[in-house]
């Protein structure tokens, strides 16, 4: 007997609205479709009416998790058009916030994955650790979500010696706790049963559809903008690409756990070698000459692309935002095929979707 | 360091360029559509070539061939988005379903990015009243 099972647009396993239509054959999914656009706010259109600083504030609100990534990418595009050289200290502060953001985003995802699997006590442990990162972000920036740390030409706030010490202390605690979570995730039988062999995306499919970020790395595709096309002084730091070959939900868990360690490594190096000097080129409304540029940034979910076109006037001529979920969401129907309906929520969530980012 | 290289091509070169890039194993980072003040469309295909972005730009063409048969969904979704928001059409692309916009939104495709904000608001209000 075949049925069509709709999931969403509003569903307990999804934090944001998306609609998936599953064509089932008994318990198994034979075909699937994904429909998006429930959060479309027309941000690209609005960006064409606003000046550069207003747009910087607005693009930070594209996403509630990777807000810094959006502001950073937009600022980098403007700086590239205007050929500005951002001071080294400003770049290091940007990297520290970007990596803290990656940490809390990955913790958030781990918690949600555990919640969907049904392991609520571990979900609370991961979110407890996430709170440590959020508290530090609040201490550094004054905010838990939209940090406002980026300005065109550098960073807006400095990191003091006291704050530096606090971050390092937090990282020591976090790493100990991460070891415990890692041992649990990699050895628990329930986790293995729910994740291993579920929602497989092969390397070929991943390359064919063009998946990015941790989702691609979990299918053995070693792409990472921080290594492949360094920006923001990322080439000053030593870290590895986290790659895992199996391509199932378990691989996505492993990749994110490994990436947490890499992020901690980068933050430590950046704090220990924080260069002296100014943090920005002066906080004024910038003059942007005519030109266009496209930048890439490794956001927590993968490659984030910003293309800005300017004609030398007050406002943007065009801002194009291509987010990682826009590239990863087309892989969902491929992954769902052949799996059971009960795993659909977990498989959709396993790409770490951010539909607000995608719909813009 | 990231770099950006702009290369102008004609409409006929889009598909051969995409084929060559696919053969070389380059990823398609973005398809960017833009309509300038004179209503002239400008579409660029941004390929990742190491740390450099090679931007192949086609100027002044309103109807373009699709490259979704070469780059699959990585090209199909941006092309569908552009067809909805701008007055640009891709030949051979399956755009039978809406991607972002609801079916009821603004009859006549592809004007949202170009239409001035004031007119868009007026049109939406008229639709609600009607």
Image (cartoon, helix red, strand yellow):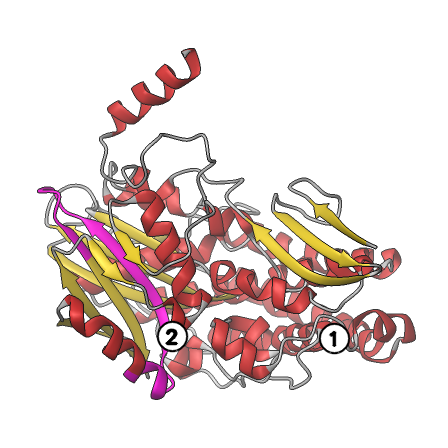
**Pick the front one: B92 or A115:** B92
Q: Which SS class for mark 1? A: helix
> Relative to A34, is A339 above or below?
below
Residue at position x 90%, y 70% in the image: A190
**Pick the front one: A331 or A301:** A331
Q: Residues under labels 2 and 1: Cα distance? A: 30 Å
Chain letter for mark 2, please. Answer: B
Residue span colored magenta: B20-42
Residue at which label 1 appears: A250
Q: Is residue A191 left or right of residue A269?
A: right
- Could you say where residue B108 lies in the image, as x and y percent from the top left? 31, 34
- Could you say where residue A236 lies in the image, as x and y percent from the top left? 40, 83
Residue B70: assigned label: 2
Residue at position x 38%, y 65% in the image: B75
Find the residue positioned furthest to the right.
Answer: A189
- Could you say where residue B35 lies in the image, as x and y percent from the top left? 18, 47
Find the residue positioned furthest to the top.
Answer: B129
The answer to whether residue B60 of the structure is visible from this angle is yes
Residue A335: assigned label: none
**Pick the front one: A8 or A116:** A8
Q: Is residue A219 left or right of residue B3?
A: right
Mark 2 vs 1: CB contact within 8 A = no
> Relative to B21, is A134 above or below?
above
> Relative to B101, is B61 above or below?
below
Q: Which SS class for mark 2? A: helix
Magenta segment includes B36: yes
Residue at position x 37%, y 22% in the image: B124
Q: How many marks?
A: 2
């Amino acid at each position: 007997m075949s049925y069509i099972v709709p999931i969403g647009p509003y569903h307990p396993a999804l934090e944001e609205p998306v609609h998936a239509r599953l064509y089932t054959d008994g318990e198994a999914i034979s075909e699937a479709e994904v429909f998006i656009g429930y959060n479309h706010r027309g941000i690209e259109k609005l960006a064409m009416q606003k000046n550069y600083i207003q747009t910087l504030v607005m693009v930070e609100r594209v996403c509630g998790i990777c807000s810094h990534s959006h502001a950073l990418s937009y600022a980098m595009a403007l700086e590239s058009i205007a050929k500005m050289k951002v001071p080294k200290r400003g770049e290091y502060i940007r990297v520290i916030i970007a990596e803290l953001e990656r940490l809390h985003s990955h913790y958030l995802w781990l918690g949600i994955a555990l919640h969907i699997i049904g392991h609520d006590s571990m979900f609370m442990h991961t979110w407890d650790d996430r709170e440590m990162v959020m508290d530090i972000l609040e201490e550094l920036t004054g905010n838990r979500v939209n940090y406002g740390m980026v300005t065109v030409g550098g960073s807006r706030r400095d990191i003091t010696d006291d704050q530096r010490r606090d971050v390092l202390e937090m990282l020591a605690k976090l790493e100990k706790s991460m070891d415990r979570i890692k041992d649990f995730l990699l050895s628990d039988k329930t986790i293995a049963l729910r994740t291993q062999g579920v929602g497989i995306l092969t390397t070929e499919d991943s390359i064919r559809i063009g998946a990015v970020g941790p989702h691609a790395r979990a299918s053995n595709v070693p792409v990472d903008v921080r290594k492949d096309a360094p920006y923001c002084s990322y080439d000053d730091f030593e870290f590895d690409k986290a790659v895992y070959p199996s391509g199932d939900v378990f691989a996505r868990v492993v990749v994110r756990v490994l990436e947490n360690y890499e992020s901690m490594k980068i933050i430590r190096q950046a704090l220990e070698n924080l260069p002296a000097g100014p943090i920005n080129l002066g906080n004024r409304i910038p003059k942007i000459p005519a030109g266009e540029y496209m930048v890439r940034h490794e956001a927590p979910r993968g490659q984030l692309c910003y293309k800005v076109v300017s004609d030398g006037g007050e406002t943007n001529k065009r801002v194009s935002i291509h987010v990682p979920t826009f590239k990863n969401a087309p892989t969902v129907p491929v992954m769902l095929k052949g799996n059971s309906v009960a795993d659909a929520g977990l498989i959709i969530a396993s790409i770490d979707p951010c539909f607000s980012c995608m719909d813009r | 360091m990231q770099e950006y290289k702009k290369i102008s091509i004609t409409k006929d070169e889009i598909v051969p360029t995409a084929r060559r890039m696919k053969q070389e194993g380059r990823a398609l980072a973005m398809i960017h559509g833009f309509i300038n003040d004179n209503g002239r469309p400008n579409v660029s295909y941004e390929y990742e070539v190491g740390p450099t972005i090679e931007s192949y730009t086609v100027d002044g063409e309103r109807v373009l061939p699709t490259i979704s048969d070469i780059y699959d969904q990585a090209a199909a979704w941006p092309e569908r988005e552009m067809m909805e928001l701008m007055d640009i059409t891709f030949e051979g692309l399956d755009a039978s379903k809406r991607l972002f916009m609801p079916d009821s939104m603004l009859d006549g495709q592809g004007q949202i990015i170009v239409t001035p904000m004031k007119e868009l608001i007026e049109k939406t209000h008229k639709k609600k009243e009607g």
